[in-house]
Amino acid sequence: MTAKTVFILNGPNLNLLGAREPAIYGRDTLGDIEAAATAKAGALGLTVDFRQSNNEGTLIDWVQEADAKAAGLIINPGGYTHTSVALLDALGAASIPKIELHLSNIHAREAFRRQSITAAAADGVIMGFGAAGYSLALEALKNLIDNPALK
Ligand code: CA2
């Protein structure tokens, strides 16, 4: 049987991981995270389509593409987490299982980061575990894909 594909979408500035702010976001680069996520997905019998964009509209297009093509979606919306009604609407329109992911615990940070606009459209949120969160999110997504009644 062909492995189901899941999209992992990463928002603005996540391409900078590893270079700056290691105390908050860790030392892994986004390339390191993609390699680990690809290996984890393989162990779960999934294929990953891993992407990053600094553009809100591109992320919205990819959410719509995921809904048409993928079995599930993990998204770290970056700063758009706290601002984007348009991304919330795109996620809300997508019927596939969806996990929101943050490297940091946004509730332990500045007041403006404590609200996620986008999380209302997610089936669940994983945050605060650094790069390991991607692996945890894949496990959670696999559970949702295999058990649609949980959604
Ligand atoms: O904790 C997360 O995963 C965030 O989504 C990361 C975003 C931030 O805006 C959210 O509030 C929480 C930031 C993405 C990465 O930003 C960097 C900035 C400088 C150096 C490295 C990464």
Image (cartoon, helix red, strand yellow):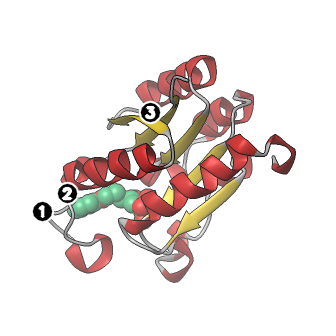
Mark 1 to mark 2 CA distance (whole Å): 8 Å
Q: How far from the left and from the top, in percent, is residue 127?
A: 52, 68
Quick one: which residue is furthest to the left in this view? 19
- Secondary structure of residue under mark 3: helix
Residue beneath disc 3? 56
Q: Residues within 10 Å of mark 3 (few under 14, many from 20)?
A: some
Residue under label 1, please give it. Answer: 19
39 to 56, vertically: above or below = below
Q: Please tell me which of labels 3 and 1 falls first in the chain.
A: 1
Which label's residue is closer to the chain start, 1 or 2? 1
**What amino acid does circle 2 point to?**
Thr
**Residue 90 against residue 118 in the figure, above or below:** above
What's the amino acid at mark 1? Ala
Q: Which residue is mark 2?
A: 29
Nearer to us of marks 1 and 2 is 2
Q: In the displayed structure, does residue 40 sit left or right of residue 147? A: left
Q: Is residue 46 left or right of residue 147?
A: left
Q: Residue at x 39, y 44 (%)?
A: 10
Q: Quadrant of residue 49?
A: top left
Quadrant containing the N terminus is top right
Note whether residue 90 is visible: yes
Tell whether label 2 touches label 1 (CB within 8 Å).
yes
- In the picture as drawn, the residue positioned furthest to the right comes out as 149
Q: Position of residue 135 (x, y in %)?
A: 45, 59
| Cα distance between the residues tagged 3 and 1 | 23 Å
- Residue 73, x across and y down, in percent: 56, 39
SS at mark 2?
loop
